[in-house]
Amino acid sequence: MNKFGFTISQGRQLNFDEMKTDKVEKLLELVPSYKFCIGCGGCTAACSAAGYTDYNIRKIHTSFFRAQYDGLDEQLKRCMLCGKCLLVCPRGVNTRSLIINMRRLLANVQPNTFVRKGAEQ
Amino acid sequence: MSWPFIIFVILYWLGSVGLIVWSIFSPFFSVYVVPFMLGVLFLLFFSIVKYWRWIHSFDKLQRAIIRKNIWSWRFLPAIWEAFREGLLHWRITKKNVLLGYMHRSLAFGWFLLIVVGAVQARLAFPDGHPFWVAIFFNYFENDHDLTAFKHAVLFANLMDALLLYVLSGLFLAMFKKVWSRPMGMKRTTRHTLMDRVAKFALWCIFPLRLLSEAATSSLFGNGGFLVNWLGDILASIGLANEAFEYTCWTLYSVALGTFFSLMPFSRYMHIFTEVFLIYFRNLGVRDSDKKTGYTMFELSACSRCGICIDGCPMNKELGIVNMQGVYMLQSIRNLELQKNAEPIAENCLMCDRCVADCPVNLDLSIIRRQVRINNKKAIDSKGGYGYLRNVQPFNSIGRVAYFGGCMSHLTPGITKSMETIFNAVGQKYWYMDRDETICCGRPLLQQGFENQAFELRRKNTEMIVNSKATMLITSCPICYQSFKKEYKLSIPVMHHTEYINMLIESGRLKVRKDDRKVTYHDPCELGRGCGIYDEPRDVLKATTTLLKTSEEREHSLCCGFNLGNPQLDIEQQTLIRNAARDNLLKPNPDLIATACPMCKKAFMRADNVPVKDVAEIVAENIIK
C-alpha cells in the first residue's frame, strides 16, 4: 500500500462532546506556559531522542492538547530529559515540566502542586 | 506497635520505678528531683532505642565500610571534629562571630557546667553521691559554709562565671529572635510547635538555675559572686525562706525534665545525633540513593538553624521560603508535615549552595534526590530506551574520548574550540557524540528517574569501554559529575578546563595573554559539585586578566537555568540569572567566562552580556 505514497486513513475529526479534557486542564494549571506553544517544532529539531527514533515532542504536545492520550505514555518514556528543548523554545514553554507532568497524568499519579511564592506558609 | 517500642516502654517504666525506689532510700533524696530524673531516663532510653534501630537499618555498603574502618584510627579526627563542631561550633563562627559565640556559649558553656559541676560534687562528697547531686549541687551542699572542701570558693565562683557565660549566650539568642541581622542571618527558620515548646523549656533552664541557687544562697550564703549578689537581693525583698527555695528548685527540675522529654521530638536531638553523624562520616559512610539509617541520623542532626535559607537563590531572588533544606528535613522527619515533603523536594535548583553553607555538612541534595526517587517510582519505567543504537565501536586505542554533552550541541563554539585545541597539540581524539548524543543520565537522576538513568549510563559505559579510549574529556559539568561520581569508569575523567590546564602547565599548549579583563562564573555542578575551582582560574590567568567578584567559589550564584528544578518558569529563571549576571558585571569586565554550556546559554540570553567559555578563550589565544 505504502508504495503509492498515500493510504486511506481514519477520520481525524475531533468530537468535542466526547473529549475528556480533564487531564489537559490539569496540565494547563500545572504548567501555565503550555498554552504559549506555537507548534514551531524547535523542540523536536533539537531533541536528542529524535536523533534515534521518531519521537516527536511537538506531536505529543498537540495530541495531548486534543485529549488524544492513546500511546503517548509509551512515546514519553523515550525522553532523556536533557533539556535541550527547553533552551531552544522561543516561547519559553517549560517543556521538561510538561513531559514529567504528562507522564504523571497519564499514569494517573497525583501530580505535584506548584510551590509558589510563600504558598502554604 | 513495633517491638522496639514495646521494649522501650518496658525499659522506661522499669527504670523509672527502680530509680525512684533507689532515690527514696538515698540520703540525698528530695521529691522535686523526680521530674528531672524522668526526663533524663526518657531521653536515655528513647535515644538508645532510636539509635539502635537506625544503626541496624544501614545498607550493605554502609555496613561494609563501618566494618572495614571501625578498628582504624579514624575515630581520632572524629573526636576532634565532634569537639570542634559540637561544642565550639567552628563552622558557624566562621560565618558570623556573634552567631558562633551564641552557639558556643550555650553548648560549650553548658558542657563545662556539667563537667565542672561533677568535679565539684566529687570533691564535696568524696564518699560518693547519686548523679543528680551534681545538677542540684547548691541545694544539697547548703549546710556548710564555703570552707567545706578544698577550693570550694573557687568552684562556686567558677560555676557562677560559667553560668554567666551561658546566660550571655541565652541573651543573644533572645536578641536574635527580635533582630537577627547582626548575627548574619536575614531570615530565621519557622519552627514547629514542638520546637518552640522545647526552646521555651531550654530558655527557662538557666535563669531558673540562677534563681534557685540565689534562693538557697539567700538562706545559706553558699554561692559565688553572681549567685550571692542575687541572693542578697532576694533576702532584701523578703524571699529568704525555704518555701520559695523549694519552689524554685522544683521549677528548675521541671524545666530540665520537660526539655529532656521533648528533645527526641524536637530539633534539639541534633546535640547528640551530630556526634554520631560525625563519627560515621569520618569512618567513610556516605548517603545512598535510598533512605537508610544514616539518612535518619542526618535528619536528626539538622539543628534547623536556618543558615541554608539565606544563601538559597530561590529565597533571594524569588522570595520562596518554604522549600529550603531545613524545611525539607523537617517535613521528612515530622509525621504531620510529611505530606509537604514531596512538593518541597521537587522545588529546588539542586545548585548545592545550601550544602556549602550547612554548618553540619549535611548532604541535602542527596536526601532531596531520595525523596524525588521515591516520588517518581510510579513513572520510572524500564526499557524506554530500546531505540538507542551503539555508535560503531570506534577503535580509539591511544586516543582520548571527547564527550561534548547534550547542551554543547547548542553551543557549537565550545566543541569547535575543543577540536581546535586537540588539533593544536596534536592529540588524536574520538568525538563520541558528534552526530547523535546519548544523555549522561544525570538530568534524569536529579529528577528521580533512577532506572531510566541507569539504562543510559549502561549504554554510555558500553560505548566508552568498547572504544578502549585512554581518557574521557567532557565539556559539560553535569556530564562531568555524572561520569566522575555515578559511572564506574576505569579511565580518568576530566573536565575540559582541567585538561586545558594540564596542557598549558606541561607546556604542550602555548597560549598568549591578551588584554581582556574577565570575571569567572563558577558553574554549580563543576564548583560545588566536583570541587573544580582552581583549574579554570589558572587557565584564565594564563590567557587573560582575571577579576575577582564578591560571590565566588563555593559561594557562587546559580545561573538559574540549572536542570534541577523543572517547576520554575522562564521568568523566575531569568530573575535568578540576572542576580548572577549583575554580580559578575560589577567589576566591569570585558567578558564573562564560564565553563558550562548551560551557564553560557543562560548568560547569552541576557542582552549585551559578552560571555565565552574557557575553551573558546583559550582557542582564540593559541600560539601556533
Image (cartoon, grey):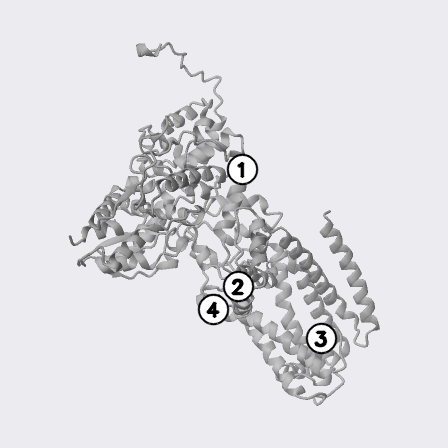
Residue B136 is tagged as 3
Sequence-wise first label, 4 or 1: 4
Q: Residue at x 79, y 73 (%)?
A: B30
Mark 4 → mark 1, Cα distance in angstroms: 41 Å
Q: Secondary structure at mark 4?
A: helix
Chain identity of mark 2: B
Q: Nearer the viewer, residue B593 or B329?
A: B593
Please tell me in which quadrant of the rendered image residue B44 appears: bottom right
Q: Nearer the viewer, residue A102 or B410?
A: B410
Q: Position of residue B600 (x, y in %)?
A: 29, 47
Q: Position of residue B298 (x, y in %)?
A: 56, 55
Chain identity of mark 4: B
Asked if disc 4 and disc 1 are in contact, CB closer than 8 Å, the reply is no
Mark 1 → mark 2, Cα distance in angstroms: 41 Å
Chain identity of mark 3: B
Q: Is residue B328 left or right of residue B522?
A: right
Q: Position of residue B374 (x, y in %)?
A: 54, 41
User: Are there few (<14), some (14-19), or many (20+) residues within 10 Å of tag 1?
Assistant: few
Mark 2 → mark 3, Cα distance in angstroms: 30 Å
Mark 4 → mark 2, Cα distance in angstroms: 18 Å
Q: Is residue B604 above or below residue B108?
A: above
The residue labelled by disc 4 is B93
